Image: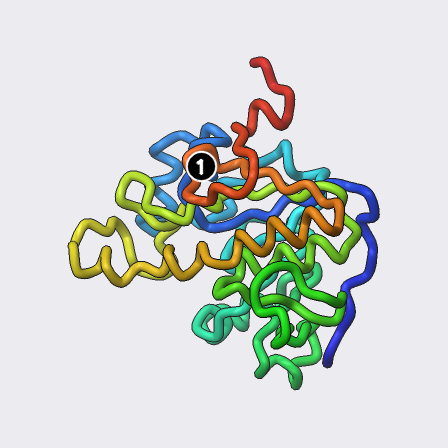
Amino acid sequence: MNWQVPRMWEGGDVWILGGGPSVTKEFGIPNEVVQSVVKGTSPPSVYSPYLSRLHDRHVIGINVAYLIGNWIDIVFFGDKGFYLKHQNGLASFPNLRISCLPSMGSNSWVKCLQRDVNHTRGISTSPKLCSWNGNSGAAAISVAAWTGAKRIILLGFDMKLTDSKQHWHNLYGRGEIKDTRKLMQLPFMRHLKGFDQIAKDAKKMKIEILNCSPDSAITEFPRYSLKELLHDNT
């Protein structure tokens, strides 16, 4: 059924946990732990203790980020392929599940937002809508904005390969990408197109967006390390 984002986090920070491999670097997750997840010998939940600084914060997890832990408040997805593969896991996730997939209207456990067809890039014009921006991470910014967030912090929004990797996991079966033909097929340029308008809309809405992916290809927002944002001098 169609839904409207409630202003449940008025004036607060909202962290959006994307899929970029910089997440594991920012949280100092040991390489052997990362490799165990990438190789499939450990579940993504082994990352949870290393992300403990987020456990008491407002967090939207993109796609498979919901597998890290139930402390993630919202799982957001807009990709049909992801949904078809993970629908059983999503059905058992205890917190909010939000999607802008048109086919989700008949699914009672998913909160559905219609795609904002008149504002496809940027932040949606209504809490009942979602600007798709061509990818789930950028689309989730609309959700964060309409919760009443004063500040949105992006994690794992690399929008580029890091150490030949596209994600902090290998659940999509892509592994390291070095083949020239595969590099040409990567969607990063398409995914980046919405951020200019997102920045303009955020400014109008008086929302600050910070990028906690220091080497991100996104240039519209100030970039910080996790230590800087958490004022961690250790």
Q: Taking 16 as reference, is 25 above or below it?
A: above
| Number of marks drawn | 1
Query: Which residue lies most toward the bottom here?
Result: 106
Mark 1 neighbour density, 10 Å: few (under 14) some (14–19) many (20 or more): many
Foreground of the two, 204 or 227: 204
Q: Taking 143 as reference, is 213 above or below it?
A: above
Q: Position of residue 34 (x, y in %)?
A: 38, 39
Q: Residue at x 72, y 38 (%)?
A: 56
Foreground of the two, 59 or 147: 147
Q: Position of residue 184 (x, y in %)?
A: 23, 59
Q: Position of residue 83 (x, y in %)?
A: 50, 72
Foreground of the two, 175 or 78: 78
Foreground of the two, 209 or 199: 199
Q: Residue at x 27, y 63 (%)?
A: 185
Disc 1 marks a residue whose amino acid type is Thr
Q: Residue at x 65, y 67 (%)?
A: 130
Q: How is the image coloured?
A: rainbow
Q: Residue at x 56, y 34 (%)?
A: 222
Please indicate whether residue 51 sits to the left or right of residue 26 in the image.
right
Quadrant of the frame with the C terminus:
top right
Q: Position of residue 233 (x, y in %)?
A: 59, 14
Q: Secondary structure at mark 1?
A: helix
Q: Taking 230 as reference, is 182 above or below it?
A: below
Please indicate whether residue 108 sits to the left or right of residue 158 in the image.
right
Query: Which residue lies most toward the top here?
Result: 234
Please indicate whether residue 75 sits to the left or right of residue 217 in the image.
right
Q: Taking 91 as reference, is 173 above or below it?
A: above
Q: Which residue lies under the disc numbered 1?
A: 24
